[in-house]
Amino acid sequence: MSGLSVRDLRVVFDGFVAVDGVDLDVPRGDVRFIIGPNGAGKTTMVDAITGLARATGRVTWGDHDLLGRKVHRIARLGVGRTFQTATVFEELTVLQNLDIAAGWSRGPLTLLRKRKAVPAEVENAMETVRLSAVRDRLAGTLAHGQKQWLEIGMLLVQNAELFLLDEPVAGMSHDERDATGELLGRLSENHTVVVIEHDMDFLRRFARTVTVMHAGRKLAEGSVAEVQANPKVQEVYLGHAVQEA
Amino acid sequence: MRLLRKPVTGFAIGAVLLFGVAPLALGDFRLDLLAKYLCFAIVAVGIGLAWGRGGMLTLGQGFFFGLGGYAMAMHLKLADAGPGQMPDFMLLYGQLDELPWWWRPFANPLFALSATVLLPMFTALLLGLLIFRRKVRGAYFAILSQALCAAFAILLIGQQGTTGGTNGLTNIQGFFGYDLNDPVNRRTVYFIVAAALLAVLALTWQLMRSRYGELLVAVRDGEERVRFLGYDPANVKLVAYVAAAGMAGLAGALFVPAVGIVSPAMIGVVPSIEFVIGVAVGGRASLLGPALGAIAVAWAKTALSERVPSAWTYFEGLLFILPIVFLPGGLASLAGTIRRRSRPSAVVETPAPAKVEVTT
């Protein structure tokens, strides 16, 4: 069972090369952090993997080629993602959001009936992301951190195996970060997790492996310690962050 | 069970009003008018589903209304003329020696009746596949749907010999063997329209409360997001669009015996916009709002035109602008606001649109 494999990925917008020939391998069960300065192409790479941005090269997840597939087909292969600004369905409740996320494979007869009971996987996911108490609140009224957790919960019920999380702790309080980190730890037991993150403190505590990107290319890769010791990385990015922290 | 009881009570009240109070309180003339308004209400329920819940501003429901209306009128004209005969207007214009081939199947009542609903639905399915797969939405969808009904009206006017042209199909006398000049039979037509409205409301209620209804709202508010959950939003929208088209077709079919005529002027751009105005005024995301709004606007049109004929157009413009600017949830949202104030913790049952998709 191979994990996520990216070969020579290139994304070009109107002549601007956002991702320039990136190779990336994330084995199953890894918790990979992708860091890099703004404009390094991190989010664009995730967009390409999930079918949102047009790209050339080769991306495989398990036995499946992802490039060229439609967004919803890629999602059905077990590739799930969150967004920098949490995008949940604000006019629906927490429960409804999770129930929809659990449902792409439902048949028309189930769809045309009212939900009678809460599906077990939805109940479990609500428990995992600590939203059981607010299940009937509209998602739009949740706190910022809770929205991020709801998105992660949606990935859980969606049966995603690969989680691509785009800055999951941006704008979170210290306690919320800790809770999210703990959640990542639990997720990694049976999922592959890729996190785009700026927060160095968070990275040091929860990353297993790190990929550093710069100007659309991969700059370095390895354990947290290896990457931190890399002079190239210190020059473009980590050096400043280390001094700050 | 408490949830079940409430809507059932609502339907019971609606049935008593439509089948008990209205026929007793209104004279023949007013009851005929009400039958016409109820036809508009059926169209409005469909628009509420497609626009209010699905975010598709269907500015051209007159097209589907017209398909249903013409299908019904063609059958009734053929039945009026008698077996093997041509409708009166074809003889009058004298261009044709025999019935055009596409008129023939409508002599069969079963074919004609199913065509009134299935033809609009099938057409909507084909159009929807083209439109939604290509991710056409928002203002572009609205303009496209409006262009469609304009083109249909122009086509009908151009083919005077076979469609009755600008006059439309007029002077319809009978309805499946019953004389429409007889007030008793007209009353029966009213009851059929009222029953159809209740049935359409029940169907839409089920669609809205089902998992599909929740998914439709999700597609309305985050079409791109839904893709990342493994759904193709085109299919979700298609269901609501086709259902709305079927309802418009049914309404058009019932409009013909209720009013006795169908013509391009009743299915073109202006009536299509009037359908939408009623929905906007009543509250597009609610179940009853569109129906009540459509009845209110149609009644206001009659009442105002009877007194000051020239004022209606301006009033209509105001009706379209005011709710969209000041009350996006329509009159139905007023009730919700009051309810929420008295029960602060209540869960909102009818999700109002998060944003106005298109305002022109």
Image (tube, coloured by chain):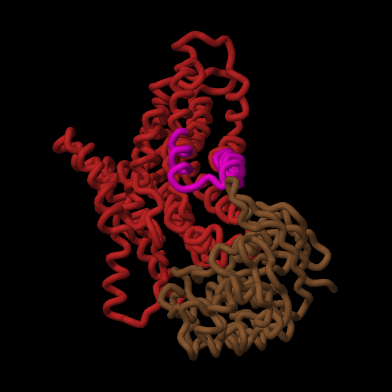
Tell me where residue B178 appears, x and y as whole percent.
45, 36
Viewer-side residue, A62 vs B195: A62
| Residue B118 visible in rendering | no
Tell me where residue B83 appears, x and y as whole percent.
58, 23
Vertical side of B104 occupied by A179: above or below = below
* Residue at x 64% of width, y 74% of height: A233
Which chain is painted in brown?
A
Q: Is residue B225 left or right of residue B338?
A: right
Is A129 colored magenta in this rendering? Answer: no
Residues in magenta, as a range: B119-147
Q: Main secondary structure of the magenta part?
A: helix
Vertical side of B236 occupied by A3: above or below = below
Which chain is painted in red?
B
Is B120 colored magenta in this rendering? Answer: yes
Q: Quadrant of the C terminus of chain B?
A: top left
Q: Is residue B40 left or right of residue A35?
A: left
Q: How many marks?
A: 0
